Image (cartoon, grey):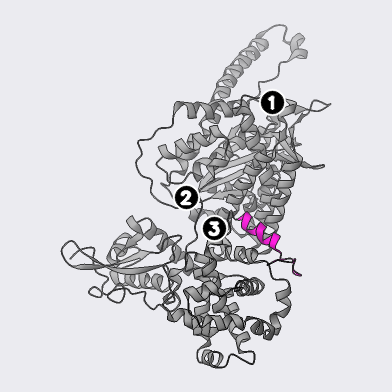
Amino acid sequence: MTGTATTNGTSAAQADAILTARGLEPIDSQRDEREILGAALLDLRAYRAIRGLGITASMFSDSAHAAIWRSIHKAERELGEGAEDIADDPEKGMRSRWIEHCQRAVQAIMKVTAQEARTLCLGFAELVVSPASVVRIAAPGLLEAHRRREELLAAHAAMEAALEDRPTENAALRLMSLERPLKRDRTAAPKRRGFPVDQLPAGVARFVSEMTSALGLEDASFTAVACLGVVAGACGGRWSVTIKRGYTVPLTLWVGLVGESGSKKSPALEACLKPLRDIQSRHWAAHREAQATFEREQKSRRRSRDAAMDASVEPEAPIAWRCLADDATVEALGRILQDNAHGVLIAADELGGFLMGLGRYTNARGADEGRMLGCFDGSALTVDRKGDGTVHIPRACVSILGGIQPGTLTRAFGPAQRDGGMLARFLLVHPPDRAGRWSDAEPSIKAIEGWALTIEALAGIACDGDEQDRPMPHRLELEPEAREMLARFHDEIAVVMDATDDGHLRSHLSKLRGGIVPRLAGLLHLIGVVERGGDPLAPEARTITAATMSAAVEIGRWFRAEAELIYGRFHEPEQEALERSLVEYIQRQEGGRITARGLHRGMSKRFKNTEQADRALRELAKAGRGRFEMVQGKTGRPATWFILKDENPEMAGEGDDTGEGSGGSGGGSGGSGGSGGGETSR
């Protein structure tokens, strides 16, 4: 089967780009499942024949397939008595009505647009090019559904035009494999990938892996992303990447680690920041000594009888070299940057406090935020202060790295900050909130020293200078293959942007594809040069290769997926937020399971008694988030446990939409005495 470019811009190549942008691969081994779905979409009687064999959503090996099966089930249920008309008399356009209802159900369950739902349904219908596997797995009656395929599609006049621009088989499959719609399907928790540590240079990757193990963390995201923020602070305004003539970006990053108190985001931050703090401490010690010497000399000059004669050679006060600022107002940043053209890193353990503290002395948070936004891109910064005159920095480069709690996140990035672009510039990471376990692992001396030497080398590079000896960044160029790779990523993200209706997410994705990924490539390039013992200032070390850009693109794709998870919470309805917090609590329990009594005890502020906890678990079961099982207790009394649906399982069947079958043995969590039972006997 061959595909053609579509009139609405959809094509096999663009579908490939969507899949690649999500780090997914074709699922070629699931042809049988896809043909079954296609036949069910083509004919209601075919769907009933398949369902009559006992096939449920739980039997599909891919969560996308399970979602489409639930959509078909939803379409039949919503048709009610009208479904009998379609089943009994599939002629006269009735089959058109069936696929239209399926299309609307797909749109509702998978949270996609009408156009996307139409493309998905038609793409799957076209997969039924050979009924062999369908007949083998389902029922001989499906052969008739296949024979009527052309008749059905011809009768469906409203979709006739769409058939001409349908994507290829693989493209349809890939559209079905998108993470975005499935993430928002409330019957399936999103599957989150860990940070791609293998894309980091070897030395940094080793430090990240060993430090993550030492901290007892299951996920390397905090450590890896904090390392990128520290490298940005060490490089910052010293370097820029030329994307094309007239378009350069500095190597600054704004990074936020999102996690509850106790999630070990602060230890991860400090472990990564230590080399930069050590460098800053040495410079502070040298500055104090120089300042003391300067003050002694000044006193001596004032006592000297020849002070007037020496006025023409008045020495300048020593300048404090800075690479870090724990918490600084815009005015303070202006003074720091005036003497440190290489830029600084704001390392804020409580990022929310820093952001909400902007403008605290001027009562003009919006104005301060506007000036801070320019520091992300190395724009000019002018600060007027009473008594101190005017400070002007032609190129202000500021990186930000800090931790923030989920509850503070929505307050720190309120509507004004989201609309103004502050949120769009941040790379946020929020791994699952699970308590870390004790670990006897320790980072090796080689890993720690290697990380420290890398930061030392990068932070020790001075800025370049122009003809007037003004500080300027050293420039990195992209080799042609690297630029082509960046262009492809740019267009991949464009497809993702077109598919979302979240304006704030679109703004972030625009920053990601246009400026952040080139910065990541520059940082990875400089780390690699230093780790190999090279000189970053050497002419031959000034070109970013395609291999480095490939790694940056992979990391960029990971950040895109992370952003989709986090940005969804800014628009999350209250009820869904409560459900999510409940699911996350159960996920943290051993085996991802809990009893109503255990839930009441663990979340007593929310559930005043076992009955309330029981009702909450029932609602989760109806939503397809898990199931109930009767487990024999230690004292011989059975207990009813709610077992959470895994992140990538296929556990929910048709009962996910109706609530049927969610009660398990005993009819739900109240099946053991009506109160949800206990872990053992009372």
For residue 223, above or below residue 621: above
Query: What element does badge 3 sit on?
Result: helix
Query: What element does badge 1 sit on?
Result: loop
Question: Can you say which quadrant of the picture contains the N terminus?
Answer: bottom right
For residue 643, above or below residue 465: below
Q: Is residue 335 left or right of residue 213?
A: right
Residue 504 position, x and y percent, is: 64, 59
Q: Is residue 83 left or right of residue 293?
A: left
Q: Earlier in the sequence, mark 1 or mark 3?
A: 1
Asked if one can make out residue 70 in the rendered structure from this viewpoint, the answer is: no
Q: Nearer the viewer, mark 1 or mark 3?
A: 3
In three-dimensional space, the C-alpha distance between marks 2 and 1, rounded to whole angstroms, equals 35 Å
The amino acid type found where label 1 is placed reads Ala
Residue holding disc 1: 462
Q: Is residue 360 left or right of residue 617?
A: right
Query: What element does badge 2 sit on?
Result: loop
Q: Nearer the viewer, mark 2 or mark 3?
A: 3
Label 2–label 3 contact, CB within 8 A: no
Residue stretch rendered in magenta on the structure: 2-22
Residue holding disc 2: 259
The amino acid type found where label 2 is placed reads Gly
Asked if one can make out residue 625 in the rendered structure from this viewpoint, the answer is: yes
Residue holding disc 3: 565
